[in-house]
Image (tube, rainbow, N blue to C red):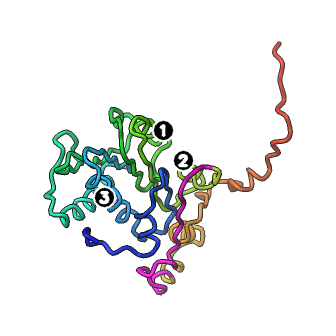
Amino acid sequence: MRLGFVPDEKQAEILRCQAKRGILNCSRQWGKSTVTAAKAVHRAYTRAGSLVLVASPGERQSAEFLRKAAELTGRLGIKRRGDGDNAVSLLFPNGSRIVGLPGTAATVRGFSAVSLILIDEASMVSDDMYQSLRPMLAVGDGDMWVMSTPRGQRGFFYETWRDDSQDWFRVSVKAHDCERISAEFLDTERRAMTSAWFAQEYLCEFNGDGTEYFNREAVDAAVDLSIPELEIGRG
């Protein structure tokens, strides 16, 4: 492909996918950021005047994502250039922009008619940020893709992944399904980590942080929604 990026089978599936909402729950070092950076560049390059926003836990991570996107645009013969308004941004000759956001919800408002929102390291992005971003898709009927390795049984990334009633295109890739990660490396990591941490980082499992008395699944299983709520009178 013109971007010089040769995707594996699962990454190619993501690049071809036209779903409005996508969620990637994948092992560390699988290439989540690279494949979605390619998706961002494709959107900006093929749709003149489009706006792509990249959110992450902090501006440094957003800048790293934009660096990957800039490498890909360079292969298209496009020189790196900011949009003049945002510190972390790419401006395309057709007027499209990719803008990297800081990690706080209070400073991201003001964008509208967004074509595509990408949330990188989504398990560490706050729910406030997620809720602030969603309305930006309204006017342009834009798309949203979120990607991360799990980090605990909390937050919008966990809730979205576990609620399969929502209309999201879902992809999960464990480390042993990635040919770029060797079995020898994983054996070393397994010995160096707790089993829960290894399962989270490399096997896409949502585990608690060790401070809970019960995990989320056990609590949910104990709730009987058929029992009506008690109405407590006043006075």
Could you tell me the amino acid type at mark 3?
Answer: His
Q: Is residue 1 left or right of residue 217?
A: left
Taking 210 as reference, is 7 above or below it? Answer: below
Identify the residue position indicated by label 1 in the image: 131
Tell me how far mark 3 sits from mark 2, CA to CA.
27 Å
Q: Is residue 172 magenta?
A: yes
Tell me how far mark 1 sits from mark 2, CA to CA.
9 Å
Mark 1 or 3, nearer chain start? 3
Query: What span is colored magenta in the figure?
Result: 166-186
Please report the residue visible at 86 percent of the width from the left and 39 percent of the height from the top.
227
Identify the residue position indicated by label 2 in the image: 156
Taking 196 as reference, is 22 above or below it? Answer: above
Mark 1 near mark 3, Cβ–Cβ under 8 Å? no
Looking at the rendered image, the disc whose residue lies closer to the viewer, 1 or 3, is 3
What percent of the width, then of the height, locates residue 22? 49, 55
Q: Is residue 156 left or right of residue 5?
A: right
Label 2: few (<14), some (14–19) or many (≥20) C-alpha neighbours in 10 Å: some
What percent of the width, then of the height, locates residue 77? 15, 63
What percent of the width, then of the height, locates residue 52? 32, 48
Q: Is residue 1 magenta?
A: no
Picture quadrant of residue 76: bottom left
- Give the SS element for disc 2: helix
